[in-house]
Amino acid sequence: MSIGCMSAEGIRKGIADGKFSAEEITVQYLERIKSKDSEIGAFITICEEESIKQARTVDNKRKKGEPLGRLAGVPIAIKDNICTNGIRTTCASKMLEDFIPPYNATVVDRLIMEDAVILGKTNMDEFGMGSSNENSAFKITRNPRDTGRVPGGSSGGSAAAVAADMVPASLGSDTGGSIRQPAAFCGVVGLKPTYGLVSRFGLIAFGSSLDTIGPFSKTVRDCAILLDVIQGGDGKDSTSHTGHYEKDYIHCMDGTVEGLKICVPEEFFNEGLDREIFQLVKKSAEILKDLGAKVEEVSMPVISQSLPAFYIISSAEASSNLGRYDGIRYGYRPEEYENLDDLIEKSRTEAFGDEVKRRIMFGTCVLTSGYYEEYYVGALKIRRILCDQFDELFSKYDIILGPVSPVLPFKIGESPKNPIDRYLADIYTATANLAGIPAISVPCGFSSEGLPVGLQMMGPRFGEKRILQAAYALEQALQLKL
C-alpha cells in the first residue's frame, strides 16, 4: 500500500471497504512525516498519540457497523493559526509560542464530526503575514518540488505537507492569496471559498474582512469534499452566511465545461508576468475553449489599484487585531520590566517579527486622523468599485481566469529586500479577498526547470460549483503527474 498516490476520497473508501484500517493509514503518514519533515519543515506540532486514538475510534465504528463520516480515517493537517483544543496553536510567532487553546475552531469540529484524523499543525508566515514561509519564528518551510525554493505563503506548511505526501489534505487560511499562491508554488490544488461560506470562529485574525479558511489537496474532487464538510452557518461567527448552502459539490464534476463563459482580464498579462507562466495559462485557456467553453479577453482597469487598497485595508485590520497582544492577558511576557508601558513595549518588541511590526506600523499610520480619510477611506472606495466591476463581469461571464503568481517559486533567501516588491506577489490574488469571491488554484503545467505553475479561476459569490467544475475539467484534460 503506497500512501503517496492515495487521495482522501480513496482512503475513506478503502477504510469503509475494509481494505486497510484507519490506524494503519495514520501510522504510515506519521512515519512519512518523521522521515521527511526534517528536510521540509512543514509541521510545527505533530499530534502522534491523539491521531492514533482518533484513528482507532474510526476503526471501532467500522467494526460495529456504525455509519462512517465523509472523511473517515483521512489524515488532515491544520494551519497553525486555526485553534485546536488542547493542542498548541502558535501562529508561527514567539508571541503565542506556548498558547494552548481551550476550544476547537468550528472547522476543526466539523472535520472531527466527519471522522477525520488530525495529524498536526503546520508552519506558516508569522500571523499570516508573508508569501514565502520565511517569516516563521521557528523554521523555514521548503518546497518539496525543489527544497532550495520557498513553498509560498502564508499557508506554505499546509501546501508543502500535501505536496510531500505527508497528508492527503490540509487546511489553510487566505487573506490575500495565502492558500492559492502556495498551492501554485507546490503543485497542489488550493481553494479560497466565498467570504462567509466557512466559519472563521477559531481562526486567529489577521484581516477580519478578508480572512477565509479553505482546503489544500492533490485533486479537485478531494478539495470539493473538504469544502462540503467545513462549510455552513455558524452562530459563533457573525460574518457567517445565513442563507442557502450548495451541497455535494462533487456531483457537478462531469469533466465538461460546455457552455461556460470564461473571461480573461488583459490586466493580468502585463509586464512583470513570467513568460512561462503566461504561456501555460494561455494554453490552459485554449484547452478550456476546445472543451466547449467560451473564452474572451476583457478589461478590468481597477485591478491596477486593488493591491495598494488591499495592503491599506489588511494592515489597518492587522493593527487593530494584534493590539490585544500586550503581555498582560496572554501570550509572550518579558521576564523583566519596570512598569506597564515597559511591559507592553518589551512584549511586542521582543515577540513580534519584523514583517508583523512593519504591517502594524503601516496599519496604525493609515488609521490616524491625518491619513484616515485619504488612505483608509480611499481604499474602501476602491474596494467598492472593484466589487461593482466584478458584479458587472459576472453578469456576463461564469468564471474569471488568470495566473496565480507573477513569478515561479523563488529561491530561499532571494525574496526582494524591498517590502513593496515582495507585496507585488499578491497582485493576482488579493482582488478575490477584497471582493469576497471564491477562487481556486489548480496546477496547469511545469516550467522548463520542472517548477509547478498554478492557474487561478474566480467565480461569483457562492459560485464554488462553477470554478470546481471548470478546475476538474482542466485537471482531467491535462492529466499532470504531480
Image: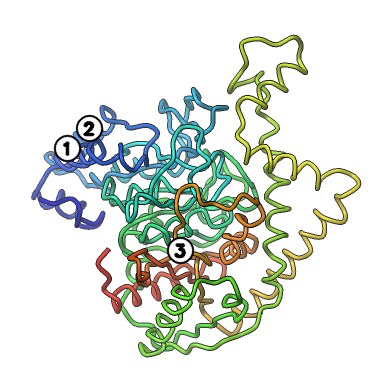
Q: In the rendered structure, which amino acid carries the disc numbered 3?
A: Leu
Badge number at residue 408:
3
Query: Mark 2 — residue?
Result: 52
For this view, does 346 lie left or right of residue 240? Answer: right
Badge 2 or badge 1: first in the primary sequence:
1
**Quarter of image, res 397:** bottom right
Residue placed most toward the observer, 473 or 287: 287
Query: Closer to the observer: label 3 or label 2?
Result: 3
Residue shown at the point (13%, 51%) measured from the top left: 2
With respect to residue 376, does 60 lie above or below?
above
The residue at the point 40 percent across, 76 percent down is: 470
Residue at position x 57%, y 65% in the image: 437
Residues at marks 2 and 1, CA–CA distance in whole angstroms:
6 Å
In three-dimensional space, the C-alpha distance between marks 1 and 3, rounded to whole angstroms, equals 38 Å
Instruction: Classify mark 1: helix, strand or loop.
Output: helix
**Front-most of 363 and 385?**
363
Q: Give the alpha-carbon distance from disc 3 to disc 2, as whole Å.
A: 38 Å
Q: Are marks 2 and 1 in contact (CB under 8 Å)?
A: yes
Residue depth check, mark 1 versus mark 3: number of the one nearer the observer: 3
Q: Position of residue 427 (x, y in %)?
A: 60, 64
The amino acid on which the numbered mark 1 sits, given as a three-letter code, is Glu
Badge 1 is on which residue? Answer: 23
Residue 154 is tagged as none
Q: Residue 235: x, y in percent?
A: 56, 44
Left or right, residue 74 beside residue 111:
left
Q: Amino acid at mark 2?
A: Ile
